[in-house]
Structures are given as C-alpha cells and as structure tokens.
Amino acid sequence: MSTPYIVIIAVMLFSIIAYLIYYYSPKTIILRRLKNLPNQRIGSLKTKTYSKIEGKALQIDTPLTAPLSKRKCVFYKMVIQKKVRSGKNSRWKTIINEEKIQDFFIEKTGERLVVLPTTNPKNYYDYLVTDKTASSGLFKELTPEFEAVLQSYNIKSDTLFGFKRQLRYKESIVEVGERIVVAGYVTWEKLDNPVKDYNYSNIAAIRANGKDKILITDSPAAQKPKHGRL
C-alpha cells in the first residue's frame, strides 16, 4: 500500500474516532437528550412523565460553599491535579476529585419544583460549565485562595527542594440563583410541612426512574434564547 493511501486511511480513522468521542461525550449526550424534550411550565407538569424544566436553582436549606470561589451553591464539582514525570514523559494525575450535591428547588415564573438527586447510588447525569480555575508552577505563584484550598486537603504546594509544584484546579458549580435546565421523572407530592415563600399544598418533584436518570446542566446551549423564555 502506498504512503498516500496510508495517510488517507489514518486521517479517516482519526476523524471517526474524534467524532465518536464527541458524539458519546457526557456533554453531547445530555444536550442531545434535552433538545428532544419540550420546555414546560411547572404547573402543567404531568405526573409519571419524563419532563424538562428551565429555571433558577434555589437552596432548600443551608447551601453548599464552593471550595475556591466560596460562592453559595447547590452543586459543585472540583478537581485538583498535579503534573508527574516518568523519564521524558509527563502527565496530569488527579489527586482530588470531589462532587457534592443537595436537594434543591427550581423556580420558574413564581412556581417551584424540587429536584431530588442522590449520590449513592448516583441517579443523575450532569454537564457543568467550568466556573473557576487556578494553577501553580515553577514560574507561577499560588494565589492565597488556591493555597488555602490545598492546605484544606493537606496538599503540599512546594517540592522537597522548595520549588512550586505544578498543580491545577478546576471548579464547576450550580450557584444559588443561577439559571439551569433539569429533566427527570415527575411526581406530585403533598407537603406535610410548609415551605418558605411557597403557598401551595402540593409540589412537583424531579426524580430518577430506573434507567431514566435526572439530567442537570447549566450550559447556555441547553437554554432557550432570552426572548423566547416563558
């Protein structure tokens, strides 16, 4: 086989692999699934249906606090990685991968529903936009905020020789008041106890149902254009 044909085949294989990685990435799967669901008002949701809602995320109780940005949120994901070397090669190794989520409200046009995610077993899929990053290295000093995060996880920022370690941090959150899109299995439930600022006896809930997981994203690509929002 001649060299040009080998190059063409290699390019085609690379393109196919790249497309499959993109098509089956969590981001693409979630956005594709949400695109096929109609936007609905909370008051018109039907029980035992898989439905999509766009609205503001609000805390039910005390909200979470994101480790680096210190913003109040109902969901955050953070990753800390360090660069490790092996001979002439180097790679980023994940040393902390933390994810915390709580039950939360979605509010839309004065109505609310409650989203009920669980982590064990995990009953949701998510795609969150990266909100905050930080890094350090030989020629880059740590910010006091990043240093405080590292200390809270007992991670040393210096090597044995006093040089700064090559570290990087990524944080994604669903901030209190942020507009997001969720989808899940709808149930209508009677409230035994009153909910602050909510004057109804029943509330819609978003749950998982078997293989139908809750979907959560703050990606603008999943949201309706501002002029088309209800």
Image (cartoon, grey):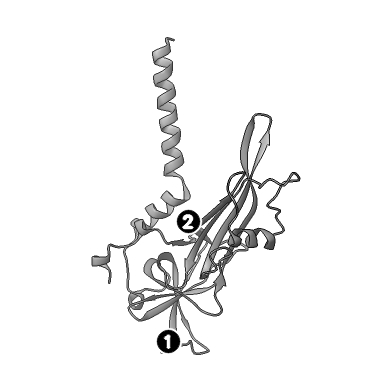
Residue type marked 1: Tyr
The disc label shown at residue 130, or none: 2
Front residue of this view, candidates 23 and 43: 23
The location of residue 125, given as percent across then percent down, is: 50, 58
The N terminus lies in quadrant? top left
Name the residue at the top extreme: 2
Graded by Cα atoms within 10 Å as few (under 14), some (14 to 19) or many (20 or more), the crowding at tag 2 reads some
Q: Is residue 205 above or below residue 18?
A: below
Mark in the foreground, 1 or 2: 2
The location of residue 72, given as percent across then percent down, is: 52, 72
Residue at the (47%, 87%) spot, across then down? 196
Find numbered disc 1 in the image and state the secondary structure of the residue it sits on.
loop
The location of residue 228, given as percent across then percent down, is: 24, 66
The disc label shown at residue 10, or none: none
Find numbered disc 2 in the image and state the secondary structure of the residue it sits on.
loop
**Image quarter of residue 101:** bottom right
Q: Is residue 160 above or below residue 2?
A: below
The location of residue 58, given as percent across then percent down, is: 46, 75
Front residue of this view, candidates 154 and 193: 154
Front residue of this view, candidates 100 and 70: 70
Q: Which residue is mark 1?
A: 198
The C terminus lies in quadrant? bottom left
Name the residue at the left extreme: 227
Residue at the (65%, 29%) spot, across then down? 88
